[in-house]
Image (cartoon, helix red, strand yellow):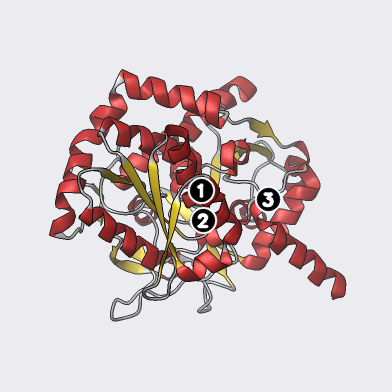
Amino acid sequence: MKYNVNDKGFYGDFGGAFIPEMMYQNIKELKEKYLDIMASDSFKNEFADLLKNYVGRPSPLYFAKRLSEHYNAKIYIKREDLNHTGSHKINNTIGQILIARHLGKKRIIAETGAGQHGVATATVCALFGIKCVVYMGAVDVKRQMPNVLRMKMLGADVIPAESGNKTLKDATNEALRDWINNPIDTHYIIGSVVGPHPYPDMVARLQSVISEEIKWQLKEQTGSESPDYVLACVGGGSNAAGAFYHFLDNDKVKLIGSEAAGLGADTKETAATLATGTPGVLHSSLTMLMQTDDGQIIEPYSISAGLDYPGIGPLHSHLFKTRRASYYSVTDKEALDAAFKLTKLEGIIPALESAHAFALLEQLKFKPNNVVVMNLSGRGDKDMQTYIDQMTNEQTK
Ligand SMILES: *Cc1c(COP(=O)(O)O)cnc(C)c1O
């Protein structure tokens, strides 16, 4: 695997574990044990059973007839939106809680921005009756009350982070502080392919069930297991990593990610990390990130809370640099248009994050017999207020 992480935790120039000494023991334990645990029969059986009977996998791979006619290509949609809790995030949290149990951990912590990862974590903690503490920026707690209430109903303690801008970055700092103080009994569930090694690799492997299924589902429906294109949106990059994973070494499959450009990649209101960023260390990983000349993180902006992140997982920085994958910027407006188009043509209301992937269909040129797989990372229920506002605006124009 040319694109696999090496034993130091690097993908080419990117990755690693730039951690404070006080976190060394926690990371060392995880690094030494995660591969053996994931390769054990007991983990594999439990993971497969829960993905099937609790999450509802395999998620369908659906041939989208009207969308295909519209864009003159053969478009298949991977329905991660149909998973329990409404997105791909549950694949990762199920896997990590099983790993935590194998490690003998009794308590789970997590950070969350919009609350989606917090809900996915609180869900699996309820499932196993394990104590759960979720750190969330105080500003986000106010903005995302429905998810805060979901987490509380699921039994989690939600702790508002009052430092800095009181958003995701500050919640992450609080979670790291907690982990340093509780190294023996606590596992930290990170929500994307970000953070110190081994998290990016561990999360990518847990999400790789997406491309594992795409291969056999495509073979069943078309006779070939490799598509011409795989398209996915990229925040930290976990749904894209999962959708790309089993195609990384097959150069015939074009891999394309979409970043959230916000009001435009050439404006200050953007989250397009690869279009505007430079290499640096964020959350203990050397990767591409949005920073000032003197290395301060630039606050990102996107209409979509799940893509509003100033960095990107080191795997994607590597795929970008080696040109194995291409990344395009998609604005708020383009994503909204794509969400309405998918809804009207296929009767599927996507998450705003996922709509960024569908907006790529406008930017790319296909041949009529090209097979294009779209990863639909989540459903749109949580974004209804944004969609309603958009419809109201259109009417009053
Ligand atoms: C969180 C989220 C994302 C962004 O996270 P990745 O790690 O980049 O996948 C994308 N889509 C949905 C529906 C999400 O909830």
Residue carrying label 3: 381
Tell me residue 245's x, y (percent): 42, 38
Mark 3 belongs to which amino acid?
Asp
Tell me residue 18's x, y (percent): 20, 58
Task: Choose the circle earlier in sequence order: 3 or 2.
Answer: 2
Q: Mark 3 packing: few (<14 Cα in 10 Å), some, or many (20+)?
A: few
**Secondary structure category for the residue under label 2:** loop
Q: Label 3 to label 1, Cα distance in Å? A: 14 Å
Q: Is residue 251 visible?
A: no
Q: Label 3 to label 2, Cα distance in Å? A: 14 Å
Q: Are marks 3 and 1 in contact (CB under 8 Å)?
A: no
Residue carrying label 2: 115
Tell me residue 208's x, y (percent): 43, 35
Q: Is residue 248 visible?
A: yes
Horizontal side, residue 280 vs residue 396: left or right: left
Q: Is residue 330 above or below residue 361?
A: below
**Secondary structure category for the residue under label 1:** helix
Residue at the (28%, 30%) spot, across then down:
102
Residue 119 has which mark? 1
Frontmost residue, 67 versus 299: 299
Residue at the (59%, 31%) spot, across then down:
59
Q: Is residue 175 above or below residue 247?
A: below
**Secondary structure category for the residue under label 3:** helix
Residue at the (51%, 56%) spot, across then down:
115
Frontmost residue, 11 versus 172: 172
Residue at the (29%, 25%) spot, across then down:
39
Q: Label 2 to label 1, Cα distance in Å? A: 6 Å
Task: Choose the circle earlier in sequence order: 3 or 1.
Answer: 1
Mark 2 belongs to which amino acid?
Gly
Q: Is residue 272 above or below residue 86?
A: below
Q: Considering the image in quadrants, where does the N terminus appear?
A: top left
Q: Mark 1 packing: few (<14 Cα in 10 Å), some, or many (20+)?
A: many
